[in-house]
Amino acid sequence: RVLFRSLLGTATATGYAALNRQHAAAKQLIGQYQVLQHAEIDLQGSFNTAEFTLLLFSMTGQHGYFLPSSLSRTEFDADVTVLRHRATPDLRTLIATQARAGGAWFTLASRIGVGAPRQPAGRALLGRSFTQAIHVVTAGRAIQARLQADVARLTATSDANLRTGLEWGAAALAVAVLLVLIASLGMLRAVTRPLSLLTRTVRRLAAGDHSARASVAGSAEVRKVAQSVNALADESDRLRAQEA
């Protein structure tokens, strides 16, 4: 019984620890993807702000609408650094594409900002900047879609593993309880069988079967009782022999 309890406790603790480690690892990975998502959202925000001011400037020709692109560029580069540092292998190509297109766009924006956007040269630069902006947005959407898919997959896998672990834990617990019950029944049988035989012997003696003797087996207490019954039966036989 002590062994079963020890095995049950060890199995439960080991299973719980394994589930905890697995869940913590999945949670950490999901957290990493969420950091990437936030960095990508921030990157898109800073880029969209810069692009919007450039469009206003190109439409109005008024420099007051055009914020210094260096401010948004600093935020953009900071977010790219976070993305590159935490990126998984399947995202690195997309992030590199987005960073390259964003860098090209900011270079073009600075050239447009010092010129006349309505002149042919300015319009040509503006057209090239639109192409780079499309690359930035396209890569950003692909990154977001992949991150969302990865988070959903990891969450589903973690939940499935947790359910499986709990099911296996419940099954192991049921088996352990069953083994304990079987062992308890075996121990109970080992105790009750000698008592049943002893009771049967006493009944035979009481019914007049003076040859009946108890089997000296079982626990120490049961053996003592059996020896006492046998001693009384022997004494009864001796007295009857004397009377005869």
Image (tube, rainbow, N blue to C red):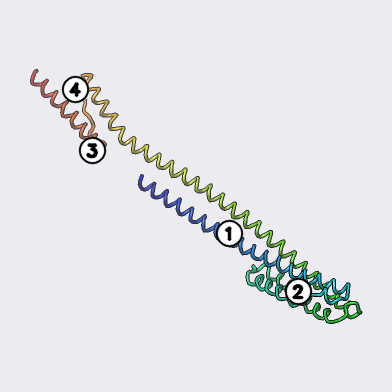
Left or right: where 176 falls relative to 90: left
As drawn, which residue projects farthest toward the top? 244
Whichever of callouts 1 and 4 sits on the residue coming sooner in the sequence is: 1
Whichever of callouts 4 and 2 sits on the residue coming sooner in the sequence is: 2
Q: Secondary structure at mark 1?
A: helix
Q: Which residue is mark 4?
A: 210
Which residue is at 65% across, 71% downward? 82
- Distance from disc 1 to disc 2, alpha carbons, whole Å, reads 31 Å
Whichever of callouts 4 and 3 sits on the residue coming sooner in the sequence is: 4
x, y (%) of residue 184?
Answer: 37, 39
Q: Which residue is mark 1?
A: 27
Whichever of callouts 1 and 2 sits on the residue coming sooner in the sequence is: 1
Q: Which residue is mark 3?
A: 220
Disc 1 crowd rating (10 Å Cα; few below 14, some 14-19, many 20+) is some
x, y (%) of residue 8?
Answer: 42, 48
Instruction: Identify residue type, mark 1.
Output: Lys
Whichever of callouts 2 and 3 sits on the residue coming sooner in the sequence is: 2
User: Residue 125 occupies which quadrant of the picture?
Assistant: bottom right
- Distance from disc 1 to disc 3, alpha carbons, whole Å, reads 58 Å
Instruction: Identify residue type, mark 4.
Output: His
User: Residue 27 occupies which quadrant of the picture?
Assistant: bottom right
Q: Which residue is mark 2?
A: 102
- Distance from disc 4 to disc 3, alpha carbons, whole Å, reads 25 Å
Asked if marks 1 and 3 touch (Cβ < 8 Å), the reply is no
Disc 3 crowd rating (10 Å Cα; few below 14, some 14-19, many 20+) is few
Please give the label number shown on residue 205: none
Which residue is at 14% across, 27% downward? 234
Label 4 or label 2, whichever lies nearer to me, is 2
Which residue is at 21% across, 19% downward? 208
